[in-house]
Image (cartoon, rainbow, N blue to C red):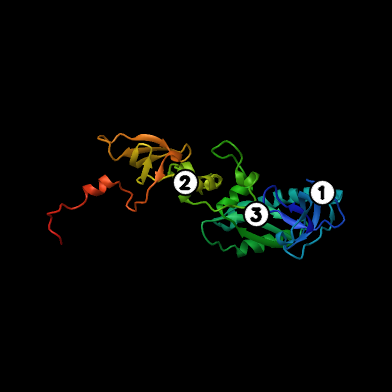
């Protein structure tokens, strides 16, 4: 077991483990740590705790120190400079007539690098833009192209549910979402109804997918043959959430469905998914000529 703290560098995003050393840190405290990008200031989101060694990537880096008053002042100064850099970059993008949309600007804590995040439809030749920015800021410049989901995460906003975007409020990483999830959950396949503000499928489709997959496994499919308390029949409608099925009985003179709960019926093996009566109707007559 190893003692760790969890540190996050943005309001939402991935949580990284560091060794607290002899420090006892509380949630929300600012700490200075060394990362792959250099020295950074982050917030403690997981207080001191022991975790299994298999959950960490060795070697675990120690924190440098608790954030001091001067460190917090540096953060405020960086935020001010980021706003100025954003406006300067917008002007340079217009000057070079580049088809790119600037999303955010970020200074590293030690001011060794300025990162400009942007979206674009394709590849952009921004070499001249980088030269201009480097001449102005006199530090390392990095332009990073991001996707529309990352743009929504950075900018934030309200979803169609009326709540803040999941990606900008609590999701650490984007989860894979597919149109198959919408189909299995019985949702409209209209893109405007199942897409978020970013134009991609809504992240919340993932939340209930495990429950739907479990219900699909125990619920007879439409068209399957089942044994009911009143005899055999074919499922013509199924409600996954309530478990209610509508079954047309084999011996029914009229195709009037009868409702049963899935726990009251038993699925029968029938690869074609058709009732014996339907199978008989499609069998050739005895005196038919065989090919």
Q: Nearer the viewer, residue 39 or 243?
A: 243
Q: Is residue 85 above or below residue 255?
A: below
C-alpha span from label 3 to label 2: 57 Å
Eye-nearest disc, 1 or 3: 1
Q: Nearer the viewer, residue 180 or 153?
A: 180
Q: Nearer the viewer, residue 73 or 94?
A: 73
Q: Judge from the rendering whether residue 213 lies leftward or rightward of residue 51; answer left or right.
A: left
Question: Looking at the picture, how far across and down is residue 237, in whole percent?
Answer: 38, 40
Quadrant the C terminus occupies: bottom left
Few, some or many C-alpha atoms within 10 Å of disc 2 (few <14, some 14-19, many ≥20)? few
Eye-nearest disc, 1 or 2: 2
Measuring 61% from the left and 48% from the top, which residue is drawn there?
153
Q: Judge from the rendering whether residue 206 lies leftward or rightward of residue 74; answer left or right.
A: left
Look at the numbered disc 1 and give the secondary structure of its residue.
helix
Confirm whether residue 239 shows in the render. Answer: no
Q: Which residue is mark 1?
A: 72
C-alpha span from label 1 to label 2: 56 Å
* Disc number placed over residue 95 in the picture, else none: none
Measuring 72% from the left and 56% from the top, which residue is drawn there?
16
C-alpha span from label 1 to label 3: 26 Å
Q: Are marks 1 and 2 in contact (CB under 8 Å)?
A: no
Look at the numbered disc 2 and give the secondary structure of its residue.
helix
Question: Looking at the picture, how far across and down is residue 53, in whole percent?
Answer: 74, 61
Few, some or many C-alpha atoms within 10 Å of disc 3 (few <14, some 14-19, many ≥20)? some
Q: Which residue is mark 2?
A: 218
Question: Looking at the picture, how far across and down is residue 203, in whole percent?
Answer: 55, 47
Q: Which residue is mark 3?
A: 89
* Mark 1 or mark 3: whose residue is earlier in sequence: 1
Question: Looking at the picture, how far across and down is residue 232, in whole percent?
Answer: 33, 42
* Mark 1 or mark 2: whose residue is earlier in sequence: 1
Quadrant the N terminus occupies: bottom right
């Amino acid at each position: 077991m190893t003692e760790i703290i969890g540190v996050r560098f943005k309001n939402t995003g991935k949580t990284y483990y560091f060794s607290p050393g002899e420090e006892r840190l509380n949630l929300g405290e600012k700490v200075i740590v060394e990362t792959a990008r250099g020295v950074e200031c982050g917030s403690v989101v997981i207080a001191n705790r022991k975790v299994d060694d298999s959950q960490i990537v060795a070697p675990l880096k120690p924190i440098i120190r608790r954030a001091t008053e001067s460190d917090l002042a540096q953060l405020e100064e960086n935020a001010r400079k980021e706003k100025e850099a954003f406006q300067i970059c917008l002007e340079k993008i217009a000057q070079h007539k580049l088809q790119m949309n600037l999303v955010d600007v970020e200074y590293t804590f030690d001011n060794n690098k300025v990162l400009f995040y942007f979206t674009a439809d394709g590849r952009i030749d921004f070499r001249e833009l980088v030269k201009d920015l480097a001449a102005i800021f006199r530090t390392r410049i990095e332009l990073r192209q991001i996707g529309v989901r990352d743009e929504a995460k950075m900018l934030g906003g309200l979803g169609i549910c009326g709540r803040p975007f999941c990606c900008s409020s609590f999701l650490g990483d984007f989860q894979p979402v597919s149109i198959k999830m919408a189909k299995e959950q019985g949702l409209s396949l209209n893109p405007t109804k199942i897409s978020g503000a970013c134009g991609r499928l809504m992240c919340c489709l993932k939340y209930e997918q495990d429950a739907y997959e479990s219900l699909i496994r125990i619920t007879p499919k439409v068209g399957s043959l089942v044994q009911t308390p009143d005899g055999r029949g074919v499922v013509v409608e199924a409600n996954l959430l309530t478990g209610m099925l509508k079954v047309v009985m084999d011996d029914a003179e009229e195709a009037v469905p009868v409702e049963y709960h899935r726990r009251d019926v038993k699925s029968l093996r029938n690869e074609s998914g058709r009732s014996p009566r339907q199978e008989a109707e499609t069998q050739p007559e005895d005196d038919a000529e065989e090919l």
